[in-house]
Image (cartoon, coloured by chain):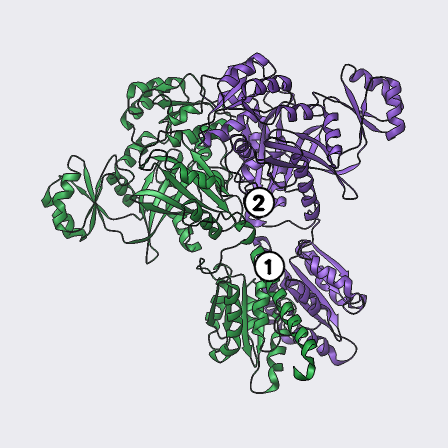
Chain colours: A green, B purple
Amino acid sequence: MDSKTVGILGGGQLGRMIVEAAHRLNIKTIILDGENSPAKQINALDEHVNGSFTDPVAIAELAKKCDVLTVEIEHVDADALQALSDKTGIEIYPLPQTIKLIQDKYLQKEHFQEHGIATTESVAVTENTEENLIDVGVKFGYPYMLKSRTLAYDGRGNFVVKDESYIKEALEVLSNRPLYAEKWCPFTKELAVMVVRSIEGEVFSYPTVETIHTNNICHLVYAPARVTDTEAEKASILAKNAVKSFPGCGIFGVEMFLLANGELLINEIAPRPHNSGHYTIDACVTSQFEAHVRAVVGLPMPKNFTSLTTSNTNAIMYNVLGTQEPDGELEFCKRALETPHASVYLYGKTTRKDRKMGHINIVSSSMHDCQLRLNYILGESAEVPSTAEQKSGSELAGTSPKPLIGIIMGSDSDLPVMSVGANILKKFGVPFEVTIVSAHRTPHRMSKYAIEAPKRGLKCIIAGAGGAAHLPGMVAAMTPLPVIGVPVKGSVLDGVDSLHSIVQMPRGIPVATVAINNSTNAALLAVRILGAYEPKWMEEMNNYMSNMEQEVLTKAEKLETVGYEAY
Amino acid sequence: MDSKTVGILGGGQLGRMIVEAAHRLNIKTIILDGENSPAKQINALDEHVNGSFTDPVAIAELAKKCDVLTVEIEHVDADALQALSDKTGIEIYPLPQTIKLIQDKYLQKEHFQEHGIATTESVAVTENTEENLIDVGVKFGYPYMLKSRTLAYDGRGNFVVKDESYIKEALEVLSNRPLYAEKWCPFTKELAVMVVRSIEGEVFSYPTVETIHTNNICHLVYAPARVTDTEAEKASILAKNAVKSFPGCGIFGVEMFLLANGELLINEIAPRPHNSGHYTIDACVTSQFEAHVRAVVGLPMPKNFTSLTTSNTNAIMYNVLGTQEPDGELEFCKRALETPHASVYLYGKTTRKDRKMGHINIVSSSMHDCQLRLNYILGESAEVPSTAEQKSGSELAGTSPKPLIGIIMGSDSDLPVMSVGANILKKFGVPFEVTIVSAHRTPHRMSKYAIEAPKRGLKCIIAGAGGAAHLPGMVAAMTPLPVIGVPVKGSVLDGVDSLHSIVQMPRGIPVATVAINNSTNAALLAVRILGAYEPKWMEEMNNYMSNMEQEVLTKAEKLETVGYEAY
C-alpha cells in the first residue's frame, strides 16, 4: 500500500500486532530485537536486526534499512534516536523528544501542568533522603505515592508511603532510582483512551474504556467504559488535549483517574500501542495497531475511523498472564475457545509467571452478555453462555445503572395508580426510574427532564396525570422520545377529563394514551417498544402473553368442568 | 495452544489468512508452495517446503514435518494425498476422498443428488461430440451451461450454449476437457454459506450471505444476505445438510442459487476457506480461517461461535482485483482507507489484471450505511461518508424492501384519515406498508398479520378503526409489537365510541391511543418509537420539532408585527 519501510524498535507482543496490521496493508516492517522475538516470528524477512533496542549501533543498522522508525516501548535510547534523526534525517515517530519527555514520569507531569492538562499533583524528590520524604508528607499528607521517574511500568518502581514510618522502607526499595512523589488520588474508576495523532496534528480518539488492574497489572478492560456519556466524553476530550500537546504522530495510550466528584486526572501516557487498546482488534474495524501504522507512514485517517464497529458493540479484554505452573494460563484460553464471541491472541512467548502471554477479547451486543462469557472463561460459572447472545440484546436489569424507562407523575397522589405499572417493569426486569414532575408546579424541572431524557439513555417515558392532565403532552412537546400517557381518575368526571386532556393532542405532538388508571398497560406498552428493537424484551413479552393466555384457558377449563354456578 | 503442526498445501491468500489465524493461537504452520508466496511472507519458519502443491514428492516432504495437512485449494493431487494418508497415517483434512469427489464437479452433483440435496440438474457428457451436445439441448432446452468437470473456477471452464449454433464453438473452447452439462438456472440471487464441520461431524454455519459476481468472479458479498429470514434459514439448512454429507472436518464454502419461487439449489461447494467468507474477519469474532484451524487441529467449536459479532452487524466485502494498469487497484484501497469502517487486506502478490490482490471489508450497524461507504470506495460518490454511522442506525427508506411500520385499517373508508399518517411516514422516509385488515370481516388475515409482523421486521403497527373499533386491540392481543390505535370518527357519536373502544383496553394488552382522526400523531409516535433505538430517526424527529417551533414563532412574529386584526 505504501512504499515506506517501517523499522520497529522492539519485537514483543505490541511489535507483533503492529507487524500483523502492516502485513494486511502490504507495508514492509523490519524488527530490531532478539532472535525469534514474537514480532519476528510472523515476518519472514531476512533483514531483521538482532540486538537490543537500547543499543545505538543496532538502531543505526536498523535505520539504514528503513524509511521511518517507530517503537513498541518507550524505554529506548531517546538521545541516540535524536542524534540519528539529526544526522540522517530519518523520520522517527513518536518523536525522540516526546519519548524522552514521557520516559521521565515527573517531566511528563510537569509537561501536562504547563499545558493546563489536569493531572495528579506531583513533586520532584531532588535527593533521596528521609528529610525530603518527610517534607512530601507534610505537603501531600499520607498516604502518598513514591514513584521512580524512569523505567517504571506495571507497578514496578511504585511505593505507597502509608505514613512516616514507611519512608525508610520506601528509600530502600527505590534507593538507586530518581524519584518523585504523587499526591494520593482516591479514584473511583480508572479510565483509558487510545488517541492517534496524524502528522498534520489532527487527533482521533477511540472510545473511553474502563481498566481494572490487579497487582498493578492490567487485568480487564471494559469497552466502552461503564460511566455516563458525559464522563466518557470528558475523558475523551482530556485525552485528546493531552496528546495534542506533543508534536509528531503515532498512537498514544492515555490512562486517567475518575474521582468521586466526576473530576478526571491524567495518570500517565504511553507513546505507543497500549494494553488498554487490545479490544480494538475485534471491537473496531480499524485496530489501534493499524491506526499507528497509518499514522507513521502517513496513510489516511478519516474522521470516526476509530469508532466501535456497530452502535451496540460491547467488549471486554482479559489479559492472559503466565501462571505459576508453566502453560497453566492455557486453561483460560481453552475456556475462551469454548466460548462463542471470545477470541484468543497468543504472543508466541515462553511461559513465565505474570508474563503477558496473550489476551482474550470478548465482543457482543451487550456488556452483560460479555460479562457472562468472561465469567465462564475465568471459571466463575460452569455454563458456557452459548446462546446468551440470542437471548440478551441489551443490558439486563440490575447490571445496568441506566434506566430505560422513566415513570413520572404530576403528584404523589398518582402513585397508587402509577406504582402498579412500575411493578410490572420490575417483574419484567426492565431498568426504570420513578419520580415526580409536575407540569404546573415544576415546569422547569419538567423541561429539563424531557430534554435530557434521550441523552440519559431513556427509551420511553410514562407520564401519569389527572384532571387537566398536561404532563404527558407537555413532556411529549419537549422530547423526541415516545411518551405514554396514563389518565388518572380524579374525584369527579370519572377520569374522562384526564383521558381527553391526554389523548386529544394537536397534530404534531403524539401521546400514546392508554385506558384510565391503567398504568399496567402503559408499562406493557413500554416493554413492547423496547422489544421492537431488543429481542430479549420481545421474548419476555411473548412469554407474558402466553402465560396470560394459559391463565384464561385454565380458568375456562375450570368453568367448563365445575359449571358456571359452582364457579 | 495446540502442539500439532499444520501443513498447508498452497500459500496463496487463503493460506496466508489461515497462517494469520494460526499465529494468534500459537499454532505452528508450514507451507508448501513457491518461495515467498503470500502465506510464507508472514511466517518466519525456515522449514517451509518450496515446490508445487500438486507434486507428490513435495507433499511427502511437507507431511514429514507435520501432524496434520490441509489445503487452501482443491486442485491438488488427491490420490497422492490418499496414498500418503494410507501409508503414514497422517491426518489430512478435508479428507482426500472428499477433495477428489469435489474436484470433479459432475461427481459432486451426483453426490448431492444421491444424498437428496437440492442441486442444479446435470448430465455427464461422455464424449465431447456435437451429437451429444445436441442431445443435451433436447433434454434441457436452451440455453444450457456446458462446464468442465475439473480445474474450473472463477468462471473458467464454463460455456453458455445459447442455442444449437453455439455447440461448435463450445466444443472448441472446452475441447480437451472432461465435460458435463447443467440445466439453465434462472436464479434471482446467488447465496453462499460458510459451514465448518468438526471431527465429530457436528456442523456450524456462518450467516447466509449474498454474492454478486462480475465476469464470473466474486465482486461483492453482502452479509447477511438481503433476503427474508425464511430464505436465509432455508439456505443455512441446505448448506449444512450438504456439508454433513461429507466425512472428515474443516470449513466448506457452499454456493447456492435462489430461484424466483423461493427454491434453493446448490451450485457448488469448495472444501476450504472461501472468498464469500472473507467478511467473517471483521464481522464475526471467529473468522472462517480460525474456524478451519480449530476444526483441523481439534480445538473447541462451541454452538454459535460462527455468528455475527453483534445483533446489528452488517458487512459488505469487496474483492480488489488487479487492474489493467499495474497497481491501479490501489486507488480503491486508498479510498477504503479514507472511509471509516472499511478495512483493507492486501495479499502480498504481484499486481496482474483480474488477479485477486486483496479485499476490503466494510462493517457497520446497517447495510445502507455499508452501501454508502462502498459507493465512495468505488468512486460512485464523491463524499466520504465519515459520519453516516452516526446518522443512520438503520436501513433507510427506499433502499430497504423491508417496511418498519405497518399501517392497517378496518375498511377503505378509513383511508382518507389514515393516509394522512402514511404521508407523514413518507415525508420522514420511514419504510412502511399500508393495507386493509378487518377484525370482523377478515379475522384470520388479521391473526396472520399480527403474528407474522415481528418476523417480517415490523417495529410498530398503526391500526385505524371506527365504531366498535376492535382492530387495534385485537392486533395488540396477538403481537408483542407496540400497536398504535387511531380512533376514526364515524357518522354518529363524534368518534368518542371509537376512542373508548380503542383506549379502554383491559389490563395486559396495551394500545397506544392517539386523538380522534389524528393519524398524523400516530405516525409521529411510530417515528419516536423507532428513534428510541435508531439515532437517525431521533434526529429527524428533533428536526421536525424545531421546524414546528420555528413555524409557530414565525407566525407569532407576523401576528405581533401586523397586529391581530390585519392578521
Q: In the drawing, does residue B466 fall left or right of residue A325?
A: right
Q: Judging from the image, what secondary structure is the residue with disc 1 in? A: helix
Identify which amino acid the numbered label 2 is placed on: Thr
Tag 2 residue = B313
Q: Judging from the image, what secondary structure is the residue with disc 2 in? A: loop
Q: Nearer the viewer, residue B353 or B15?
A: B15
Q: Are there few (<14), some (14-19), or many (20+) residues within 10 Å of tag 1?
A: many
Residue B91 seen in the current view: yes
Residue B366 is labelled as none
Quarter of the image for residue B192 reads top right
Q: Residue at x 56, y 68 (%)?
A: A523
Q: In the drawing, does residue A264 fall left or right of residue B63?
A: left
Q: Residue at x 68, y 31 (%)?
A: B269
Residue A296 seen in the current view: no
Q: Nearer the viewer, residue B13 or B235?
A: B235
Q: Are there few (<14), some (14-19), or many (20+) residues within 10 Å of tag 2?
A: many
Q: Residue furthest top?
A: B57
Q: Return the x and y of residue A268 as percentages of the image width and height.
A: 31, 42
Q: In the drawing, does residue B191 fall left or right of residue A399?
A: right
On what subunit does the disc labeled 1 rest?
A
Q: Return the x and y of residue A406 as percentages of the image width and height.
A: 50, 66
Marks 2 and 1, how far apart at CA:
20 Å
Tag 1 residue = A538
Does residue B257 lie above or below B348 as drawn? below
